[in-house]
Image: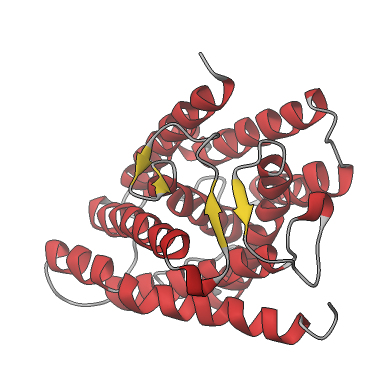
């Protein structure tokens, strides 16, 4: 079996473990909202980024990924979910906080953003080997392997936007199925917000290049 | 409103740590094999979070917990 196909399957299986953890510790409603919303966000966002040339960001390497949904690798269906879930869980334990109940919420979110940037370092160094991503622009600032520094900023911003949206939707006093649908629909707001977040960094660093 | 509804056993509680460790080892391992390893990006950032998480668990007064 191809090494990368094995990695894709491992990532899907590990996400399954995280879904089990979430259902066991946070309940069914949180789990449905978080992981279905994350799947929807991943697939829609990455298809938008890959297909809209005007964004001038990146596309995914067809020689690397095996399983696709449109222009996005299938793995993106779980990628944002599992990274943000790890970020939130680690941050809540480290800060002694809880996003939903409000205990040290700001610290939990800030630490989640830092976790995401840290995970971006690990992930993007790995991604550069295959490469997973074909960049469409020459970045002003790069980290190891030529990865745009914007990526760290982008991962952190995704955690911020996703967790705030999750918090807003989770707190709604309506049936879970409606909260899931609203959170999935909210990607049409989350995606432009995240693209704006990235654009701010690119604008701020453009003078350096 | 609290999202936590149960106190899980040790094995379920530490699933996130296991998942991150697996990703960490696989990514860093492949980077070493492909001669693209860099301590600053491959090990340190995620490693610091793992250390902080373990320390937080060890020093937690509650001993148990959700996330």
Q: Is residue A7 above or below residue A100?
A: above
Q: Is residue B47 above or below residue A204?
A: above
**Foreground pick, A7 / A102:** A7
Q: Is residue A189 above or below residue A108?
A: below
Residue at 40% across / 75% down in the picture?
A190
Residue B1 found in image quarter: bottom left
Question: Would you say A199 lies left or right of A45 here?
Answer: right
Residue at 21% across / 72% down in the picture?
A182
In the rendered image, which quarter contains the C terminus of chain A? Answer: bottom right
Say if residue B60 shows up in the picture: yes
Q: Is residue A49 above or below residue B11?
A: below
Q: Position of residue A23 (x, y in %)?
A: 31, 45
**Foreground pick, A70 / A187:** A70
Residue A20 found in image quarter: top left
Q: Position of residue A170 (x, y in %)?
A: 29, 70
**Foreground pick, A18 / A152:** A152
Residue at 71% across / 56% down in the picture?
A118
Question: Would you say A108 lies left or right of A119 here?
Answer: left
Residue A149 found in image quarter: bottom right
Say if residue A103 shows up in the picture: no
Q: Position of residue B12 (x, y in %)?
A: 44, 34
Number of labelled discs? 0
């Amino acid at each position: 079996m191809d090494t990368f196909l094995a990695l894709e399957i491992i990532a899907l299986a590990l996400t399954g473990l995280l879904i089990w953890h979430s259902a066991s510790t946070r309940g069914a409603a949180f789990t449905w909202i978080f992981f279905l919303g994350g799947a929807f966000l991943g697939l829609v966002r990455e298809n938008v980024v890959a297909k809209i040339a005007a964004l001038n960001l990146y596309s995914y390497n067809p020689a690397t990924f095996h399983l696709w949904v449109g222009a996005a690798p299938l793995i993106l269906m779980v990628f944002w979910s599992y990274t943000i879930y790890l970020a939130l869980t680690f941050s809540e334990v480290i800060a002694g906080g809880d996003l939903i109940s409000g205990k040290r919420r700001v610290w939990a979110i800030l630490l989640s953003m830092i976790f995401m940037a840290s995970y971006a370092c690990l992930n993007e160094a790995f991604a550069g080997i295959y490469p997973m991503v074909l960049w469409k622009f020459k970045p002003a600032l790069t980290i190891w392997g030529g990865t745009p520094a914007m990526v760290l900023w982008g991962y952190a911003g995704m955690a911020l936007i996703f967790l705030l949206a999750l918090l807003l939707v989770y707190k709604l006093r309506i049936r879970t199925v409606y909260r899931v649908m609203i959170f999935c629909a909210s990607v049409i707001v989350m995606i432009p917000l995240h693209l704006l977040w990235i654009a701010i960094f690119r604008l701020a660093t453009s003078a350096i290049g | 409103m609290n999202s936590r509804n149960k106190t899980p056993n040790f094995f379920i509680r530490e699933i996130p740590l296991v998942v991150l460790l697996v990703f960490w080892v696989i990514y860093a391992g492949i980077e070493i094999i492909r001669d693209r390893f860099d301590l600053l990006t491959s090990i340190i950032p995620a490693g610091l979070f793992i250390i902080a998480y373990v320390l937080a668990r060890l020093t937690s007064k509650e001993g148990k917990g959700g996330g």
